[in-house]
Image (cartoon, grey):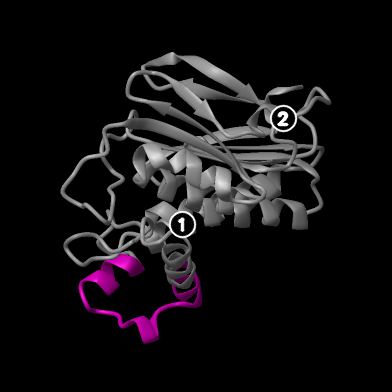
Amino acid sequence: MKNRRLIMGMPVEVGIVGSNAERALEEAFAYLVSVDERFSTYKETSEISQINRGEISLAAASAQMREVLALAEKTKRETGGYFDIKRPDGKRDPSGIVKGWAILNTARLIRDAGFEHYIVNAGGDIASNGKNENGQDWSFGIRHPFNKNQTVKTVYPRGKGIATSGSYVRGDHIYNPRAPGEAIRDVVSITVIGPDVFEADRFATAAFAMGKHGIQFIESLSGFEGYAIDAQGIATMTSGFSVYTKC
């Protein structure tokens, strides 16, 4: 069973292989909607918007909010400041970390409901496990940044998480915290495969903010592989990335 809905401003696909999956599917979407209601900076009533307006203190924030903000601070330290949810105006925007976190939690909900074979895909950040409806390994295409109708690579994550950061879909929505006034121009996308989708997502965001040096950062991380495409359309991959291109 598979369904796609617009949540968090992007198409979200949830697929569960197995009988009687309707309830698990609905619970998965309901959870993602609740995350959007809490963390969206575009919703005036969201908790993060109230925090940014000073109406809710960090001490009074929900447990989920405190968890995400703590994970963001941890990622900032681990990336040398290249990941930072504080915008130049001082407001917090956790979207660079909350998507992967939410996808991972959704996958856990599906597993806890008793399903082993599933996919959760939110805007190209993906958690998957087991086999697809045809009994084959899940496979996903990395979109060509200059031609949305083409893919440049097909990958087989086999339970690992995938996340892609780039400017070719949403424009310059990621910035370099070390040089916030400068747009990132030398790299257009970087795809990261990591232990789970949360880990892949947070480091993909940081690596993209690093520009052309981001792929070397991913190379330095144990358990991670990456595939970057620069402004000239030239791809660079980490030393072990090809493992995930073989079916």
Q: CA distance from mark 1 to mark 2?
A: 28 Å
Q: Give the residue type that dot 1 points to.
A: Val
> Can the viewer see residue 17 in this picture?
yes
- Please state the horizontal and vertical placement of residue 155, each as a whole percent of the image: 65, 26
SS label for mark 2:
helix
- Please state the horizontal and vertical placement of residue 46, each as a whole percent of the image: 33, 64
Q: Give the residue type that dot 2 points to.
A: Val
Dot label at residue 159: none
Callouts 1 and 2 close, C-beta under 8 Å: no
- The answer to whether residue 213 is left or right of residue 102 is left
SS label for mark 1:
helix
Q: Is residue 162 above or below residue 26?
A: above
Task: State the extent of the magenta-drawn residues as a range.
Answer: 47-68
Q: In which quarter of the view is residue 207 placed?
A: top left
**Residue 50 is a magenta residue:** yes
Between 212 and 55, the residue placed more toward the observer is: 212
Q: Is residue 65 above or below residue 142?
A: below
Residue at 28% across, 50% down: 176
Residue denoted by label 2: 243
Dot label at residue 98: 1
- The mark that comes first in sequence, 1 or 2, is 1
**Residue 146 is a magenta residue:** no
